[in-house]
Amino acid sequence: GEDVEQSLFLSVREGDSSVINCTYTDSSSTYLYWYKQEPGAGLQLLTYIFSNMDMKQDQRLTVLLNKKDKHLSLRIADTQTGDSAIYFCAETFDSWGKLQFGAGTQVVVTP
Amino acid sequence: DAGVTQSPTHLIKTRGQQVTLRCSPKSGHDTVSWYQQALGQGPQFIFQYYEEEERQRGNFPDRFSGHQFPNYSSELNVNALLLGDSALYLCASSLPDTANYGYTFGSGTRLTVV
């Protein structure tokens, strides 16, 4: 099984905020990432956070990191239909950057 | 500026055959990593190439091998294909200090083994 766990599905109304959660198990993780995958496409890096940070904001995206609980979340403000995709949480432990991914959360945005 | 280019986009092979997938990294990137993404799963790390050498390897059998060329492009070879090798194969390129700069992923090659 994977060391990174995510809920599998999230449904949200257009204009609302989405919160996608992730639990990781390795406390030695250096960077934690959020990637987006649309149908038939590769992975798009949305944002990342270094393990010594608690929060990072980038336009509509807010990442929160709770190292004590090994919990990472991604909040998308004002969710749009174009945000419908699968979102992957990933961690890496070294500077070479081998990524350990979760199984992904499918986000469906309804009008 | 072209991103990561993978070929072919789709491929159907028969059990026992061999396959070669190709990847051209993003301009300026010299490190190439390969990931396997089974249906409904997150990507799994296969290996990473830097300076034409395999630098890091995931938990994949020796049937999976690779190569990096002097122009930084890369190939993934899979021998003796099994039905379970059916997946989306993603190539990702980066600078050597990947963790600080992140990957750029290609759109993948969809391999179906019948």
Image (cartoon, rainbow, N blue to C red):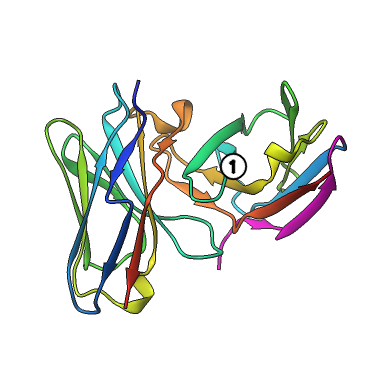
Q: Amino acid at mark 1?
A: Lys
The structure residue drawn at horizontal position 83% and vertical position 31%, both measured from the top left corner, is A78
* A108 relative position to B106: left or right: right
Residue B1 percent location from the top left of the image: 35, 20
User: Which quadrant holds the C terminus of chain B?
Assistant: bottom left
* B75 relative position to B4: left or right: left
Number of other residues with Cα within 10 Å of mark 1, as a class: few under 14, some 14 to 19, many 20 or more: many
- Determine which residue is flagged by label 1: A36
* A83 relative position to B76: left or right: right
Mark 1 secondary-structure assignment: strand
Res A69 seen here: no
Residue A51 percent location from the top left of the image: 62, 34
Residue B10 percent location from the top left of the image: 33, 57
Which range is magenta?
A: A1-15
Where A47 falls versus A69 (above or below)? above
* Number of dots carrying numbers: 1
Q: Chain of mark 1?
A: A
Residue A5 found in image quarter: bottom right
As drawn, the residue found furthest toward the front would be A111
Q: Is residue B35 magenta?
A: no
Residue A31 found in image quarter: top right
Res B6 seen here: yes
